[in-house]
Image (spheres, rainbow, N blue to C red):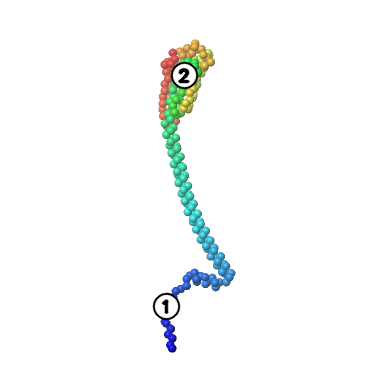
Amino acid sequence: MRVYKRKLEGNEGDMKKPSKWKEFVKYIKKLKPDTKILGIIAIFTVIIAIASLIVALMSMLIASNQAEESRKQTAAMFDEIKEMKLQTHNFLKAAKPHITFTAQTQWVDQDVGVYIRNSGSGTAIIKQLTLQVKDKTYDALNAKSFIEALNAMGLYVSDDGTPTYNCFGSEYHFHQGIYENFIVIRKMKRDEAIFKKFSNAISPLVIKIKYESLFSEKFEENFIAAQFFD
């Protein structure tokens, strides 16, 4: 009986080659024990290095996201600060001062005389304050000139019941709601004769004030004593 061998079709290269992993395992098995251990250590080292790189990349990504979030929060905070500053600016600009002079002609709860008040909603900066007595003008922001104005009205320091006066000085900040005496006779001097003399003396007085708001808005106010004292 003849036995025929079947001829293999194709080339040997067409046969299925073993996988790279199997070749690698086969190669490892052939290694000496010491070499195997070193190989395994090397493999784990590579794996750890790759894992470390992945962790580093993830950390960079997280840090980048946190930095962006922090930047957005900072920008939002500065926007809020700008809005608050704008609101404060608008509030202060709307708060206007209003200086007025009032006359107290009876001894009730106050000394008689002239008072100054800021009845507005903002601070007044006094720029000019003058006392006009007949045909002469005196600077009421200067203490010496203020006394000269009082003397010109016949009000002297030696007089019993001489009024006290308030010299504020240049650039004085007269705040909202402040109420001060300007030229008054103290309550302890309740003497009608003294008040009559004071009333006659102060009647020619004209007070003129120029002032500004905190935003340089300009205002003026006049007070004519003859309308209240005679």
- x and y, in percent, of residue 106 in the image: 47, 15
* Of pointers 1 and 2, the one earlier in the residue sequence: 1
What type is the residue that disc 1 sits on?
Asn
**Outermost front residue:** 1
Is residue 65 positioned above or below 230 on the image?
A: below
Residue 123 in view of the camera = yes
**The residue tagged with tag 2: helix, strand or loop?**
strand
Tell whether 219 sits left or right of 43: left
Q: Quadrant of residue 120?
A: top left
Residue 154 in view of the camera = no
Residue in the image at 55% along x and 72% along y: 31
Dot 2 corresponds to which residue?
114
- x and y, in percent, of residue 178 in the image: 48, 25
What type is the residue that disc 2 sits on?
Val
CB atoms at circles 1 and 2 under 8 Å apart? no
Given this view, does label 1 or label 2 mark the residue nearer the observer?
A: 1
**The residue tagged with tag 1: helix, strand or loop?**
loop
- Nearest the viewer among 65 and 210 is 65
Residue in the image at 43% along x and 30% along y: 95
Residue in the image at 47% along x and 51% along y: 65
Quarter holding the N terminus is bottom left
**Outermost right residue:** 34
Quarter holding the C terminus is top left
Picture disc at residue 11: 1
Is residue 205 positioned above or below 14 on the image?
A: above
Residue in the image at 44% along x and 28% along y: 121
Is residue 214 positioned above or below 42 on the image?
A: above
* Distance between mark 1 and mark 2 Cα atoms: 126 Å
**Outermost top residue:** 193
